[in-house]
Image: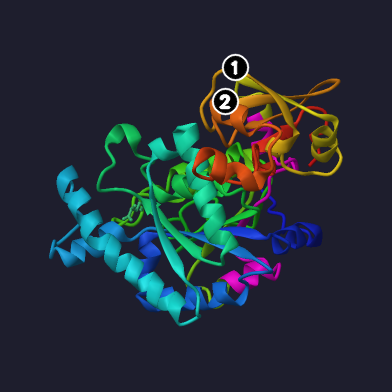
Amino acid sequence: MKHYQPTEAQRERVSRSKRIVVKIGSALLAKGGTAIFSQLAGQIAAWMPPEKECVIVSSGAIAFGIDVMGLKKRPTQVSLLQAAAAAGQPRLQQHWSKAFARQNIHVAEVLLTHADLANRERFLNARHALAALIAHGVVPIINENDSVSTDEIRVGDNDSLSAQVASLVNADLLILLTTVDGLYTANPDKDPTATHIPLVTHFGVIEDFATSESGISGLGVGGMHTKVQAAKTCSKRGIAVVIADGRTPQVLKKILAGKTVGTLFLPSIRVASRKHWIGFTLKPTGVLRVDAGATDALVRRGRSLLASGITHVEGKFDRGAMVEIVGPSGPIARGLAAYAAHELTQLMGKNSKDIARILGYVSIPEAVHRDDLTLLEYHHE
Ligand code: GLU
């Protein structure tokens, strides 16, 4: 089987990425030692705002917790795992804040569960909070909220969580840092005929390579299988993914410089298909009728929908609901409403700066943010 190297155009696409999610696995933190925190923080600081924006998904709470609680190995009992996560998370966070403080960068801690991502209102809340952190140059450090997660609400592994976070923040690139330099045709530790795969543009046979190598570390729960699944999730949303060995010197710098490092997953679809998901997967539960000015702003100028352009609000819906946006000559877009129907009824025709006075709070200044909106006829953005 012939393995293709990424072309120059494909590598350039990676280096142009603006919003990047970096996921650090437990195995890497265990093998790389605490030096890994400062190495990664240093590299991230080198590409921070305004050029690039970064969100980190960091494992390691349970691994640190095992140490804090003096356990000999990873417990199997759920309550002990949850206790270890709770005991280890502050230590994990402390390592990140110290490492970034040396770069004069502030960090924030965000703990999520699957329930936060599955519920549209909580999804939007998380998205807006993260967007505000990013806009202020603060690096969000995200982990699963393991100590309160039950089976029903768990994401389960941070590879999947990072793919969901990449979609949540509308990232261009997800970098999964681990202790293997990407995907091989078989487990390279066990099979000498295993060959490295530098580029993946189609899934299928690739998924078979990865199934044999799951649950490798004993500290974390992921493996190559969950990483490839994460890449697949991202590909549906138009997000590129790199799996690389986090111990490679200057690994992040090299990836962003367009060097061939690890395995690059480049989806064939270039459309931001997360928007496709907003536009065509969810069902509208209300209608926002807008004036000609707002129609022009949405259709021709790539803007968000502001309350001032809304003329009618139809239907009963909560914040985060999918609504259809209808201009003077018909439906133009679909999007996630940042406010509930009764709130938008109060806000329509009003200036964004009056939101606080009218509602007593401001979620975001827009009624439907551009990132949460899909035009019905123009899917090319
Ligand atoms: N959330 C877990 C932790 O911080 C890690 C999950 C994983 O290894 O993917 O320990």
72 versus 155 height, above or below = below
Q: In the rendered view, does 159 fall on the left or right side of 68?
A: right
Q: Residue at x 20, y 56 (%)?
A: 84
Q: Which comes before the other along the chain, label 1 or label 2?
A: 1
Q: Position of residue 256 (x, y in %)?
A: 66, 67
- The residue under the point 48% across, 78% down is 39
Front one among 346 and 233:
346
Q: Which stretch is magenta?
A: 252-278
Q: Amino acid at mark 1?
A: Gly
Q: Which residue is mark 1?
A: 315
- Tags 1 and 2 in contact by the CB under 8 Å rule? yes
Q: Which mark is residue 341?
A: 2
Q: Residue furthest front?
A: 357
> Can residue 125 be found in the magenta stretch?
no
Which numbered tag is attached to residue 342? Answer: none
Asked which quadrant contains residue 86, the reply is bottom left
